[in-house]
Amino acid sequence: MKQVVSGDQLTSHKDLGQGWNYGDYKFYGHSLAGIRTSLTMPDLKICFDVSQGYPFSLTMQNYFITHGHLDHAAGIPYIISQKMMSAHETPDFYMPSSLVKPMTDIMDLWSSIEGFPYRYRFLPITGDEDIEIGKQFLVKPFPTTHRIESFGYTLFEKKKKLKTSLANASQDDIIAARRRGEDVNEITLTPVVSVTGDTQIEFLESRPWVKHSKILFLEATYLDDVRTVEQARQWGHTHINELIPRLPEIHSEQIVIIHSSSRYSNDHAMDLLRRKIPAQYHDRIVLFPGR
Ligand SMILES: [Zn+2]
Ligand SMILES: [Zn+2]
């Protein structure tokens, strides 16, 4: 089992967030229940939730907001305002559709307070949209279960491969098909990264690909028995005791726990996870802390 700690793998600095990578996928961010949650993939310029708008998230282009609670979304006005000071492209913020109107009202107020106009796009999501990220990737939102409208997001990698119907065709047949102007390729989508915001464990059933994402960031707010499963559910969160029996059905190579409660120090959280989670899963579990 692994804990992302200061100085681990990539750089670590409060403003940069904690760095962690798995294969070619690099992440910077932080996540602590009720305090701050934001996760960036700088190579793709994408960001899932924005905390209070920390410097590591300012240079992203596409922002995916899981829900409107302040520990996830308070940074939206700050990021937009900061981008107006420099020559950034207009940023896109994808968010639950119920959030667009109130956030637009907030932006109008901040704009009048600051005395200059803002450039941004708020794009409502309802689930299952295909949001293209360059030529190689796309993001799809999936609904989650929280106290207010909420979504998780999955990053898919797109690969072109020969159509399955042509798998047994000869080289000559394929060349002939191409000459006739037929498209001999099809696009395959591989779920590489899924990220939940705050949600009850039901998100696992939201869409079939979630449990098959190569890297799954999921919230587990409560890690001990001081709080019960019922209390976690009452607040729209996941308790580690609900997650453990579900581990056999999660095919992710890495399961990254975010949004643990601030009542646990990093070491205490690791200790709880080590004791609770069966040893056979330890090398697939990562704790992504928010400190
Ligand atoms: Zn939260
Ligand atoms: Zn929340």
Image: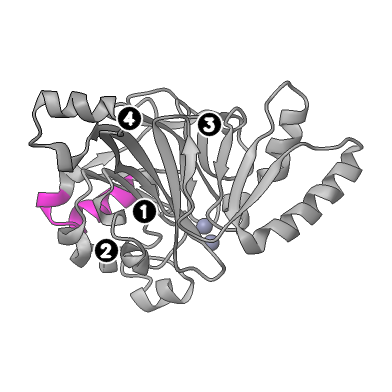
| Residue 131 higher or lower than 103, as above or below | above
Q: Which residue is mark 2?
A: 243
Residue drawn at x 29%, y 32% is 160
Marked residue nearer the N-terminal end (3 or 2) = 3
Residue type at tag 2: Leu
Q: Which residue is mark 1?
A: 218
Residue drawn at x 21%, y 56% is 250
Q: Nearer the viewer, residue 42 or 6?
A: 42
Q: Position of residue 291 (x, y in %)?
A: 47, 41
| Residue 45 higher or lower than 3, as above or below | above
- Please report the bounds of the magenta region as a residue range: 267-281
Q: Could you tell me what secondary structure mostly forms the magenta stretch?
A: helix
For residue 181, the mark is 4
Q: Can residue 197 be seen in this snapshot? A: no
The CA span between labels 4 and 1 is 45 Å
Residue type at tag 1: Leu
Marked residue nearer the N-terminal end (4 or 1) = 4
Marked residue nearer the N-terminal end (4 or 2) = 4
Callout 4: SS: loop
Task: Judge depth for marks 4 and 1 and give the one in front.
Answer: 4
Callout 4: few (<14), some (14-19), or many (20+) C-alpha neighbours within 10 Å? few
